[in-house]
Image: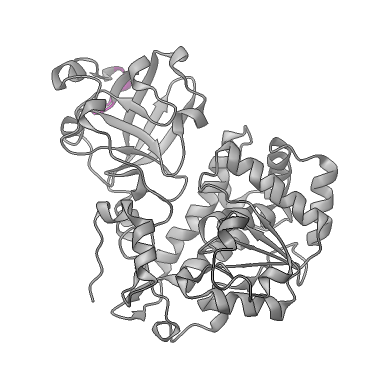
Amino acid sequence: MTKKRSILAELLFCVLVFLACNDTDSIPVVIGGSEPETSPEETAATDSAATDSVTTDSTAGDSSRLHFVLGENEITSSNLYLSYPADSFLTKFEIGDIITVTIVGYDTLDIPVVESSNDAPIAGISLKAVSGSKELALTIHNGRLAEILGITVEKAPIDVYISMKEKGGFLFGLEMRYFQYMDYYTVNYPDLSIEEFANFREVRTTGMGKNKLYRSSSPVDLCLGRNFYADSLAKEAGVATFINLADTEDNARTFKSFDSSYYSTQDVIFLALPVEFFSKPFKEGLAKGFRFMIEHDAPYLVHCTYGMDRTGFTIAVLEALMGATSDDIKKDYAKTFTNYFNVVDGRQVALNEEQAGFFEAVVLKNLKAVYHAEGIEIPDASNADWAPATEKYLEKLGMTPKEISDLKDKLK
């Protein structure tokens, strides 16, 4: 059947997944959470006043380049609001364009114009322009942009310039947001092995030791219909230590499969990390998980619910630490999406090269953006030497040089 979900449906993601566990319909997968749209009461100015606060920057030789001033009312801990009617903005730019946003004194960003922050991949920054709204929002999918950039009301006013980077450059990315459907029956994945269906695999990128690190969807959460496969595969591989990025221990123990699982007999740390790679709780939890690995024996298995976003980023960091190439990292990350998507009319259709390439680009952008937020620059993500940059990143998370060395020794 044809599968379409509205933006409202994405806001009810958790409910949909719960219902999907008791239904035969496919599960729509949203890469991360969602945020409420700005209410009319939150708008900071009338259309006319907002228009008066924006000028065309003729000095740059581009009549479409806009100049904004962020005042105290436009800066929140999460988003940065530009007091300018979305409908006026959309006469100059369109949904799916990629624009260059220069926040003077802070950063220059190449980002898409979208209708919802969820239209960008996890950790992706975007400009949200909702028709009818009296303002625009600089935002990030699952994160707090102003906090990440270090912008507070005390630093206002701040000049912001917007210009065109690539007309329609994100249209394919928007298409990718609405075809990502998975199912929880193996029969609908006739071309996948059981390992692929469970999103279970050993990580064998450059520098990683044999039988040291695995990744999968949750071995205990029944909701995706993959837990029994992931648990049995972990047992077969002799996994001794599990890193659960998704759950608290109390929550995990409520799963009906928990007490009878192989998983429950091994060492497990429950981190319950938010899907916010830039946030303090995520960074502290990541370091805690890595220290747990140092203190316990391999083989390790890292998982969240899908084994996709939190797991994808965590595994990418470990791969980078051990000397993986950009090609290693992106191919392993994209494999997860090959394992889940794209179920159409009850059968998975293999991703084409362009679709797989979209996901490959996501993980490198995420690593580069997260490292950049910590003051670690990666000039060329496609050919980066990730190991030294990752050691610096782990130091920023509070790990000592000895802890980093010990973690590497555990994974060799």
The residue at 49%/24% (across/down) is 106
The residue at 54%/75% (across/down) is 198
Vertical placement of 173 versus 227: above or below? above
Residue 85: quadrant of the picture: top left
> Of residues 112 and 122, which is closer to you in this image?
122
> Of residues 269 and 117, which is closer to you in this image?
269
Percent position of residue 213, x then y: 71, 66
Percent position of residue 242, x then y: 69, 63
Residue 166 visible from this viewpoint: no
Q: Is residue 91 magenta?
A: no
Vertical placement of 280 versus 10: above or below? above
Percent position of residue 94, x then y: 22, 42
Residue 128: quadrant of the picture: top left
Q: Is residue 62 magenta?
A: yes
> Of residues 232 and 179, which is closer to you in this image?
232
Residue 325 visible from this viewpoint: yes
Is residue 41 rendered to the left or right of residue 193?
left
> Of residues 119 and 39, which is closer to you in this image?
39
Percent position of residue 371, x then y: 60, 40
Display coloring: one colour
Vertical placement of 330 versus 216: above or below? above
Is residue 157 rendered to the left or right of residue 168?
right
Quarter of the image where the C terminus is located: bottom right
Q: Main secondary structure of the magenta part?
A: loop
Is residue 379 rendered to the left or right of residue 292?
left
Q: Which portion, as a residue range, is magenta?
A: 59-65
The residue at 26%/69% (across/down) is 3
Count all numbered tags in the image, as a single digit. Answer: 0
